[in-house]
Amino acid sequence: MVLAFLALAVIWEWAVEIFAIKEYLLPPPSLVLTEFLKRADVIGLNAITTTNEILAGYALAVAVSIPLALATAYSRTVEESLYPVVVFLQIVPKIAVAPLFIIWFGFGFAPKLMLVFLLSFFPIVVSSVMGFKSLDPDISDFARTTGAGGWRLFATIRLPQALPHIFTGLKVGAALSATAAVVAEFVASDRGLGYLLLQYNGDLNTPMVFATIIVLSLIGLALYYAVELLERLVIPWHVSQQAAQGGAALA
Amino acid sequence: MSRATVVASRARPAQDAAPGAGTQVPAIGVSSATKRFSRDGMETLALDGIDLTVARGEFVAIVGPSGCGKSTLLRMVAGLIPATSGSLAVSGQPVAGPVTDLGVVFQSPTLLDWRTIIDNVLVQVQLRGLPVERYRDKAMALLAQVGLEEFAQRRPRELSGGMRQRTAIARALIHDPPLLLMDEPFGALDALTREQMRIDLEALWLRSQKTVLFVTHSIDEAVLLADRVVVMTPRPGRIDRVVEVALPRPRGLDGRRLPGFAPAADAITEIFLARGVLHGTRA
């Protein structure tokens, strides 16, 4: 994969040179790198701001959605009252709500956190509910003949079999969280990578636009892979199973 | 015909259904059990007036066409589905809610993907809140009995369907229950595996002295395994006849060649012909 990216950079570099493309349209990677190194401190500072927004919003989303999923799966009242509202709200284009958050929460950290929360919350809650509810009826019947209930049943069967679904939601949520932070910063902010991106774009400083986008992508990627690493540690049986299936599909 | 006799009789009342039932508490007692399902305002009578007594240590098979309610009956005995009317008892205890003093095997092995084979056997013990470590040796011994000791550390999806079903059988036996309920346990297996599983189950049962209630579609399987075969009518499910199979044991590999096999299988086939479950011309 690293080789593929290197090859892409080399082709890009040559193409820009051979076709004499103007650097404000498409800067060569070497220029992106040198410009980035000149302003690494500015990017670094703003990257910290954006990373904090992403992490805080994502953590809040996880903290709210998994208990909500549990409540939905185990309480008929919650399933019939609260969950339909959650599903309905999922239809609302959440990015369109961003300007409203500025009115409600001001220009600081809060509206960014809220938008990250909102975007990553839904996929986590929806897959977790599915995970907690999808128990094979025969496995359920077998468990009933053991007399197990409550915590023992939850820890032994219900939670482990829900985990693959939960992780699917966590990964989708992680991928959305970087987008959410940048959109929130676009709407109104005085720091962060989204803010920086608008500044550089306004100056037609295309090399720095590229550098900022690359750093943003790396932050999103890092969060995604952190969740995937956690998945490998928590449910190795499921990951290897998927790998086996993927291998079979390729063969 | 000298060694084996076959008795086909009308479904008999509970008292004299099993030998020695008067002196001993029967393993399973079902009297006038009825099950009605209602779905979308439509009522279906699934089971109608079932009377059945199974003595301790007896192997009873239930055969009948699809939808005759034989699986429903098994689940009612396990207390997984409540009866609409009538009463059921297991080991003399009235059934009201799931019965725990038994082992179940369903058509699908219902193993947990994330656990190794031995941990799938031990989950039975774990769910019951028993000390898992103390059962580990026993779990290995059971896996050896079903020919899976080499696979103890594998996961279910690495095993064939037959091996998974063997794991499910070991899981149903680990806590040493007096009663084993099997709902078409070999139904999803290929014919050869099924034959082997049948032979091995008989051997296992002969050593264990457990009571077995075994639901199947297969007339051969029922006759080769059971002491008595309960033949059910199409919906609403009633007990049509109870066919006694007095073949010697072990019936094993060539049980079909025993003199009593053909008459018993024929008796059941005749019942299905008479009920319109089977059609065809005779050879």
Image: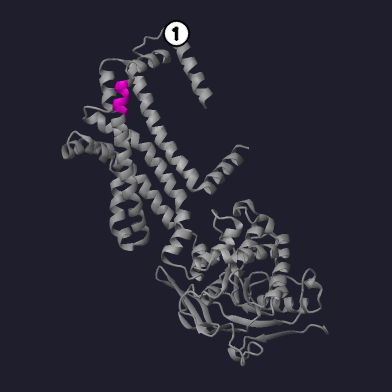
Task: Give, as a single range, the part of the protein colored magenta.
Answer: A41-47
Q: Position of residue A102 (x, y in %)?
A: 19, 36
Q: Which residue is mark 1?
A: A17
On the question of residue B250 being in view, the answer is: yes
Instruction: Tell me the element at label 1.
Output: helix
Q: Which residue is the extreme one toward the right?
A: B2
Q: Name the one closer to the observer, A153 or A42.
A: A42
* Picture quadrant of residue B230: bottom right
Q: Is residue B117 above or below residue B94?
A: above
Q: Which residue is the extreme one toward the bottom?
A: B22
Q: Is residue B264 left or right of residue B215?
A: right
Residue occupying the point 69% across, 55% down: B150
Most frequent secondary structure within the magenta stretch: helix
Q: Name the one closer to the observer, A125 or A35.
A: A35
Q: Position of residue A122 (x, y in %)?
A: 34, 46
Q: Name the one closer to the observer, A82 or A154.
A: A154
Residue occupying the point 16% across, 37% down: A103
Q: Position of residue B197 (x, y in %)?
A: 70, 65
Q: Is residue B40 left or right of residue A85?
A: right
Q: Is residue A141 above or below residue B113?
A: below
Q: Quadrant of the C terminus of chain B?
A: bottom right
Badge 1 crowding class, 10 Å Cα cut-off, few under 14, some 14 to 19, many 20 or more, is: some
On the question of residue B108 being in view, the answer is: no
